[in-house]
Image (cartoon, helix red, strand yellow):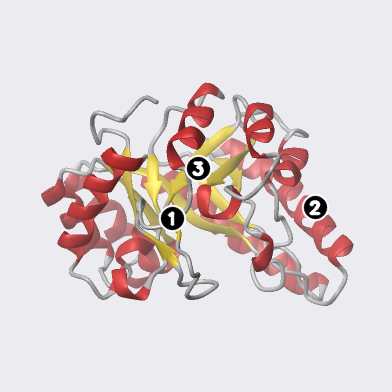
């Protein structure tokens, strides 16, 4: 199987070095010669959009995506509208910071009605598409592992994400393929093929065994059971040759000096991705 020979597509998803500020993460990428970064909105908020943009532009680093939009379901119409408004702000941030991808983590049900919650997700995306298109931003639906259905997203399969995305043009709505969330799916490779032309992002990490924690249990590539390379090749066969984000929630990695994390990330990227 084809091994990646360079890191020209490698992106640091900012959550992987969560203790770093935006500027520290950008500076770390420059030292490690990592050409891309994926930004989280709470890190942007810490210093403001203007300073975030200045740091990015001064560094000459490329932004692969902004995380996150979504979180559409809510108990009241007023709260649902507030979430739409916040998503519009996220779209503005993506456009201002030079990326055309806003990652959507779609949100859990406010009650036990999953059908209604999934309709809220579909309705929310429908409301956002014209606003995002005007600003040159694509909406990337990221299906999460089913274990996250109660707390983070009612969209729990690539098939369901494709069902929603298929209603729109590829330059409006697409999908994010995150190996941590989809590696287990017996329908994965068929759904990746189905998503041809509308894959907007590819995220890598690993699934540790035994799994230490539902949220904070991701591992560095090569430390778990995911067969990473066939998934990357399938995503490329489906037309995606953009940045590859390393996105890891893991306290041990967060507690490791960031420069060490980036050095290991680069090594494992070449070896395993």
The residue under label 1 is 206
Bin the neighbour count of mark 3 within 10 Å (Cα to Cα): few under 14, some 14-19, many 20 and up. many
Tally the marks: 3
Percent position of residue 81, x then y: 73, 65
Q: Is residue 172 above or below residue 41?
A: above
User: Which mark is first along the chain, 2 or 1?
Assistant: 2
Most distant residue in the left direction: 31
Could you tell me which residue is drawn at 24 percent across and 59 percent down? 25
Look at mark 2 in the image and give the residue it sits on: 123
Q: CA distance from mark 3 to mark 1?
A: 23 Å
Q: Nearer the viewer, mark 1 or mark 2?
A: 1
Query: Which numbered disc flags the more N-terminal residue, 3 or 1?
Result: 3
Q: Secondary structure at mark 1?
A: strand
Q: Which mark is residue 126?
A: none
- Say whether marks 2 and 3 touch (CB < 8 Å): no
Q: Which badge, 2 or 3, comes first in the chain's sequence?
A: 3
The quarter of the rendered structure image containing the C terminus is: top left
* Helix, strand or loop status at disc 2: helix
Apparent side of residue 193 relative to residue 23 in the rendered image (left or right): right
**Residue 97's x, y, as percent?**
37, 47
Decide: is 67 above or below 204. Answer: below
Task: Pick the quarter of the image with the N terminus.
Answer: top left
Cα distance between the residues tagged 1 and 2: 33 Å
Tell me where residue 272 appears, x and y as whole percent.
34, 42
| Residue bearing the label numbered 3 | 101
Q: Residues within 10 Å of mark 1 (few under 14, many from 20)?
A: many
* Residue 86 placement, left or right of 48: right
- Residue 27: image quadrant is bottom left
Contact, mark 1 vs mark 2 (Cβ under 8 Å): no
């Amino acid at each position: 199987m084809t091994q990646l020979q360079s890191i020209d597509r490698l992106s640091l998803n900012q959550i992987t070095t969560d203790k770093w500020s935006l500027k520290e993460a950008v500076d770390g990428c420059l030292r490690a010669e990592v050409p891309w970064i994926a930004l989280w909105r709470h890190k942007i908020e810490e210093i403001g959009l203007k300073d975030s943009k200045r740091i990015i532009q001064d560094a000459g680093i490329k932004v692969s995506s902004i995380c996150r939009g979504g979180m559409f379901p809510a108990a009241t119409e007023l709260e649902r509208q507030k979430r739409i408004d916040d998503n519009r702000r996220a779209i503005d941030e993506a456009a201002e910071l030079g990326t055309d991808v806003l990652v959507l983590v779609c949100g859990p049900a406010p009650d036990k009605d999953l059908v209604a919650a999934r309709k809220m997700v579909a309705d929310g995306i429908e409301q956002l598409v014209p606003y995002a298109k005007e600003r040159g931003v694509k909406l990337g639906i990221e299906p999460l592992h089913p274990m996250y259905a109660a707390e983070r997203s009612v969209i729990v399969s690539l098939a369901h994400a494709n069902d929603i995305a298929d209603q729109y043009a590829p330059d409006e709505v697409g999908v994010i393929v995150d190996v941590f969330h989809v590696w287990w799916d017996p329908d994965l490779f068929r759904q990746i093929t189905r998503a041809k032309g509308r894959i907007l992002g590819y995220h890598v990490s690993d699934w540790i065994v035994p799994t230490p924690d539902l949220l904070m249990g991701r591992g560095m590539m090569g430390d778990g059971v995911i067969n990473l390379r066939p998934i990357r090749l399938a995503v490329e066969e489906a037309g995606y040759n953009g940045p590859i984000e390393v996105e890891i929630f893991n306290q041990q990695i967060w507690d490791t000096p960031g420069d060490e994390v980036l050095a290991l990330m680069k090594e494992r990227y070449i070896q395993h991705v």
